[in-house]
Image (cartoon, coloured by chain):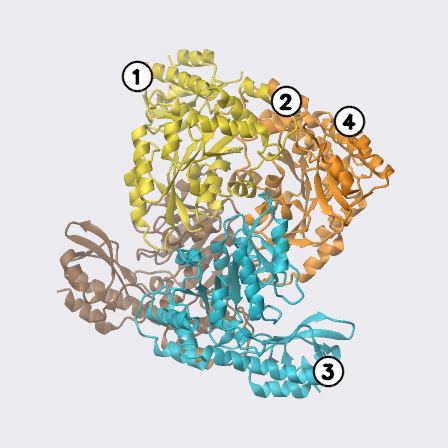
Chain colours: A yellow, B orange, C brown, D cyan
Amino acid sequence: MVKYSFKNDYSEGAHERIINALGVTNLYQDDGYGEDKYCKEARSVIREKIENPQADVHFVSGGTQANLIVISSILKPYESVIAATTAHIAVHEAGAIESTGHKINTIETSDGKLRVADIQSVLDEHTDEHMVKPWAVFISNSTEVGSIYNKKELEALSTFCRKNKLYLYLDGARLGSALCSEKNDLSIAELATLVDVFYIGGTKNGALLGEAIVILNDQLREHFRFYLKQKWALLAKGRILGIQFLELFKDDLFFELATHTNNMASKLVQWIKKHNHTFLTDPVSNQIFPILPNTLIAKLSKKYGFYVWNKIDDKHSAIRLVTSRATKEQFVNKFIEDLE
Amino acid sequence: MVKYSFKNDYSEGAHERIINALGVTNLYQDDGYGEDKYCKEARSVIREKIENPQADVHFVSGGTQANLIVISSILKPYESVIAATTAHIAVHEAGAIESTGHKINTIETSDGKLRVADIQSVLDEHTDEHMVKPWAVFISNSTEVGSIYNKKELEALSTFCRKNKLYLYLDGARLGSALCSEKNDLSIAELATLVDVFYIGGTKNGALLGEAIVILNDQLREHFRFYLKQKWALLAKGRILGIQFLELFKDDLFFELATHTNNMASKLVQWIKKHNHTFLTDPVSNQIFPILPNTLIAKLSKKYGFYVWNKIDDKHSAIRLVTSRATKEQFVNKFIEDLE
Amino acid sequence: MVKYSFKNDYSEGAHERIINALGVTNLYQDDGYGEDKYCKEARSVIREKIENPQADVHFVSGGTQANLIVISSILKPYESVIAATTAHIAVHEAGAIESTGHKINTIETSDGKLRVADIQSVLDEHTDEHMVKPWAVFISNSTEVGSIYNKKELEALSTFCRKNKLYLYLDGARLGSALCSEKNDLSIAELATLVDVFYIGGTKNGALLGEAIVILNDQLREHFRFYLKQKWALLAKGRILGIQFLELFKDDLFFELATHTNNMASKLVQWIKKHNHTFLTDPVSNQIFPILPNTLIAKLSKKYGFYVWNKIDDKHSAIRLVTSRATKEQFVNKFIEDLE
Amino acid sequence: MVKYSFKNDYSEGAHERIINALGVTNLYQDDGYGEDKYCKEARSVIREKIENPQADVHFVSGGTQANLIVISSILKPYESVIAATTAHIAVHEAGAIESTGHKINTIETSDGKLRVADIQSVLDEHTDEHMVKPWAVFISNSTEVGSIYNKKELEALSTFCRKNKLYLYLDGARLGSALCSEKNDLSIAELATLVDVFYIGGTKNGALLGEAIVILNDQLREHFRFYLKQKWALLAKGRILGIQFLELFKDDLFFELATHTNNMASKLVQWIKKHNHTFLTDPVSNQIFPILPNTLIAKLSKKYGFYVWNKIDDKHSAIRLVTSRATKEQFVNKFIEDLE
C-alpha cells in the first residue's frame, strides 16, 4: 500500500494548466536565457500584481538559487546577512551562502520570525573591521516553521532596516500560503513596498519549477543578469519559467492554488484541535506542527507520509504536516477519520 | 515577418513525447530532489546504454551547472583545469569556474580540440607551488566550434591523462550530435570507458531542460549529492529531469533526435558546398560555419536568424548555422533556395 | 600621561634576542619563501620539542592566516568546522573562514571549551546533503576567554574525533601561556599526539610576527605549500619567520617567556582575590577577567589600558587584563597598589 | 663554495637602518593592527612624497597579498581584471586572484607591458552577461620582465581607463627600481595622479617585509580595513610595517637603495654589451635578461646563482640576473671578470 504524503508541497508535478501551457507554446521559436516573449509578459503581469511598474523581475529554478544569488549580489566580501537560526539559508542549503563567501549571523527565535530587537543586538555586537559587517536581513514568509509576518511586523522591520542601512530580503518560497492565510493582513503590493527584494515561490505553488525574484530597490538592479549567469541560474530555455509564471499570474491562479492549499491545512487544524491536541507553533499556513501521542503517530504513519519534527516528552512528539495545491480533500478527510 | 531561426539549438520547447510524459506523471506523489522513481529508472537506462552498471548518474538543469559542479568537485583549491581558449567554461560562463576559485589554463587551438602535446606544454610550465597545479582536463564533444573527437583522438587523451594523473571531463552539451555525426566512430559506451566523468546534454537535444552527469571514476563519486545541493542544483521536483531522460533513453529517442538534427545540418552543408562556399571549420555536426559573401549574408539575414561569427576578408564573413531536433526540413529547403 | 597597557599581548615588539638574531643573520644570502636554512633549522628544533621527527612545520605571519589555511585545506567545499561561539574564527576574523566558502557550526559554551557532547549534538543534527557535513573541530588553547584544556579533556576530544572521522585542529595563538599555566598537565609532545594539526603562536609570545603550523596527520601534509602560496601566506623573505622560531625554540626561550607572562597574571590574580573580587572565568592563563566595582574600574582606567568586557550588574563589570612576555613587574605592582 | 646569488632581490634581510629601527622602537607600547604611531607617521611621509594629502595608505606583508586584496576589493563577483600573460597575478600567485572568484583576462605582449589597443580588444570581445565584465586593469612597474612604463605610456593607459570606466592598478613590487631607472621620466607623484591605486614594494627594496598600498580613487577607500582583515592581512604587530616604511621614506632611503640596485644592474649591462651579447628585453631596471652562450652560462653557474630563463637556440639561452639593494659591487666586478 502506498502512503498518502503530507511530507511536503513538492511531491507532485505542476498544475494541469501549466502542463498544458508548456504544450501549447512548445514549437514557437524564441530567444533563450529569459529574453523570450513569455518571460516578458510574465514580468509585466507580476509588475501589475505588485503595482510597481518599475520592479525588475528575474526567474530562477529554485529557492536556494534565488536566495544565494540575491544575497551574494547585495553583499561585499566582508558583509554578512542576518537570519533566524531556523532560516532555510542557515540550515538547509548545505552552506550555499557561505560557499559564496559570506557569514550568516543567526538569531534564536521562538517562532522563526525576526524582530527589530534581535537585529539591533547583532548590530551592537559588530563594531569594527575585526568582525563581519551585517548588511542584509533575511526573512521568510511564511517561515520555515509555518508562521507568517503581519503588516505591522513587516513595517517595523522595514523601517528599522532602512534606518540602519540594512537591505531587507524576503524568501517567498511559500509566499502564496502566507498571503492567503486567514491571519494575513498584507497584500503582495504592500509587501513590495516594504522590502528591497523578495521572491515569489512557484515550485511549491503549482509550477514544475521556478521562483520569481522581484527587485524593488534601484541599487540592486544593476547587472543582475550577470549574477544570474555567473551563478549558473540562466536556463537556455528560460521560456519555461516565463510560461509557468504567466499562467500563474495572468489571472489569479497563484492565489487560488494557495487558498486551496491553506484550506486543506485549516481543515486538518480544525479537527486536530477538536481532538484537543495542541501545536508546536500557531498553525496559520500550509505547514502545521501538531503535538500528538506517539501511539497515534505510529498509527498514522502506517497510512500517511510525514516527518516527526521533534520529541516533546516521553509520550508525545510534534509532527509536521504539509498540504499543497495538489492535496486531495478525500485524503484529508481520511486522515481526520484516522485521528480518532 | 518572423525570421526562421538557425541561431541555436534551444529556440523551441521539448519533444512532444516529453511534454506528454510530464502530463502523464503529473499527479503521482514521490520524493523530491532526484530520489523519485523516474530519476531512478532514468539512471538505470543510462547505465545500460553506456554499458556500465556501476556508473553514477546525476541530473542537473543546465550545462554551466554541470561543468562547474563537476570541475569544482574534482579540484582542490590550488588546482586548475586545462581547456581550449574556445571552451564554454573559458568564455561563455561569465567566470563561473573562477567563481568557485579555480583557474582555467587555456590553450589556443585551431579547431577547438585539445591534443596531448598541448596539455603536456601546460604541465611543463607548472612546476612548483608558486603556480596552480593542473589537475583536470576539460573537453567538449562536439566542441564549441562544431568539431568532434574521433576514437583515436579520445583514446590518446585518455591514455595521457591517466598516465599524468589528470582527470578527463567531457562536456556533452551536444553529445547527441557528436555521436550521430557521419564522421563519428565512437560509441557512448566506448566514450564512457575513456573519460572520468562526462555529461549528456538534454536541453539541446529534446528536453525542456536537463543534463545527465555520468561519473565513471570511483574517486569522484563520494558525496556528489552534497556538491549538487551546495551548488544550488538540486531541484525540489527533481522528477522532471528524470522523466525527461527516461523518455529520451528508454528507447533511442535521444539518438533519433540527434540524427534528425545532423541530417538538417548535412543538407545545408551539401548545398553550401555545391555553391562552392567553404567553411571555417570542417562541418561535421549540428553547428556549421560557412564562409559567405557579405552580400549573400545580408540577403539571408532578412529571412533567417543566425550569428555572424567573424570577418574573413573585406567581402566575406563566416556565419554560424545551428540546427536542432525541432528544425523543420521545409525551412532548410527554403534556406537552400535562398542560397542562389 | 601615557597609560600602561594590559589590553593585549601584542603591544610591544619582539624579545631582544629576536631583534638581535635578525641583525646577525641579515646579510646572509639564502633562498626565499621559507626554504632557507633558518626555517629548516627551526623546523628541526620544533620537531624535537614535540618529539615527532615526521611532523611537517610551516611558518605563517599570523593566527587568522594559520586558521583559515589549515581549515580550508582540510575541508571539501560542502564540509564545515565545529567551534565554540566564542572561537576566534567565529567572531574576530571578519568572516575569513566563510570567505573560503565554509560554514562554522557554532556551539554555546560556558567557558570557551568544547566538549564531546557538544560535538555529538552537532553531528546528530547533520544527517544529509541538504546540510553541510561537519568535518573538522576547532579548539583553542588557551581559549579566547583564558581557559585551558587539561590532558583528560583533550584526550576525550581526540578519541571522539578519531572515532567520528573529524579532524581536530588546535589554535595555539597563546599556547605558551596555556602550557606554562600552573593548572596545565599537558606537554607539547603529548598535545601533538592528540590533535591532527595545531599551531604554535609566536606573535603573542616574543616574536615580531609568526606562527608555526604543525601537521601531524599524514592526510593533511600533501601539497600544503600550495595552500600557503595560494592563500597569500608565503613571505618572500620567509627566513624572518624561521630566524625567530629558531631563537624561541633552540633553547626554551619560548617557555621562559610564557612563564614570565603567566607569573605577571598570577600576581594580579592573587591580589585581586585578596581584595575579594571574583572572576568571570577561572583565571589560569595570561588573560584574566576580574569582576570589579565600576568605581574602581573608572579609577584604574585613568592609569591603565584594558578592555571592559561586559556588564555584570548595575555596579559591577568584568574587565579583561592581559599580560605579555614584555609586561614589567613594576607596573603590575603599581596596578596592585591601585586596587586598594 | 657558496655561490653569490643574482637569483632575486629578496635573498638577504633588511637594510641595517631598518633592523636598527626595529630595535629602537621595540619596547614602546602601542595599538595593534596598523593603528600605531609609526604606521601613522609612515602614512604621512608617503602622502607627502606622492604629494597627495588625501591618499589612503595601508600596509601589508607581501605583493600577492596587496594584489589580491586590492583587486578583489574593486571587483564585483562577475567582474574581471585585465593583465599581461606574464603578469605576476596571472602566473606566479598560484591562482590567488581566481581563488577570490575572479577571472583574469590575459593579453600576450612582447615586453610585459599593456597597451591601449590590447585592452580595447578585450573590451570588444566582452559584450554581454554570458561573459565576465572587465572592470580593472593590472600593470606592474617595473614589469615581470624588467621593462618600465614611461610617462607617455602611463598617461595613455590612464586616459583610456578613465574613459572606459576601468580601474587602473599598478603593482609596484619593484617600483623603486622602475622610478630610479635611467630611462624613467615619471615621478612617484605623477604616477599617483594617473592610477586609481598602486602599491610601493618594500620587501624587494630594503625591508624585511612590507608593501604600502596607496589608494587615490575615492570609490575604493571605503571599508578597506575590512578587506585587509577578512583577507588575513592585518598583522597584530602592524607597527613593524610602519616602522620600516617610515625609515624608508622619512628621508629618501627608498630611492637611494633603488639607485644602488640599478647601478649594479647597469654595470652588468654595460659589460655584457661590451662583450657583444644581446638581451631578451631592453635592460632598464634591476632585472636583466642577457642572452649568452650555453658554455658561458655553464661556467658562470659554478660561481653564481641565477635562473636560466629560456632557450634561444641550440647554443644560446637567456638568463635572468637580478640585483638588489644588498648586491655588493665586488661580486658584480667578479662576475664581469668571469664574462671573459
The answer to whether any part of residue A3 appears in the image is: yes
Q: What whole-number distance in Å separates the C-alpha atoms at marks 2 and 4?
A: 22 Å
Query: Disc 2 and disc 1: Cα gap in Å?
Result: 47 Å
| SS class, disc 1 | loop
For the residue marked with disc 4, what is the amino acid? Glu
Task: Using the image as rendered, state which of residue B318 and residue B188 is in the foreground.
Answer: B318
The residue that disc 3 covers is D276
Q: Label 2's element?
A: helix
Q: What residue type is labelled 1?
A: Asn
Asked whether the residues under the numbered discs 4 and 3 touch, taking CB atoms below 8 Å apart as contact, a structural biologist would say no
Q: Label 3: how many residues lie within 10 Å, few (<14), some (14-19) or many (20+)?
A: few
Residue A90 place in picture, x, y as percent: 42, 39
Image quarter in which the C terminus of chain A is found: top left
Instruction: Please name the amino acid that badge 2 sits on.
Output: Ile
* CA distance separating discs 3 and 1: 102 Å
Q: Residue at x 67, y 22 (%)?
A: B16
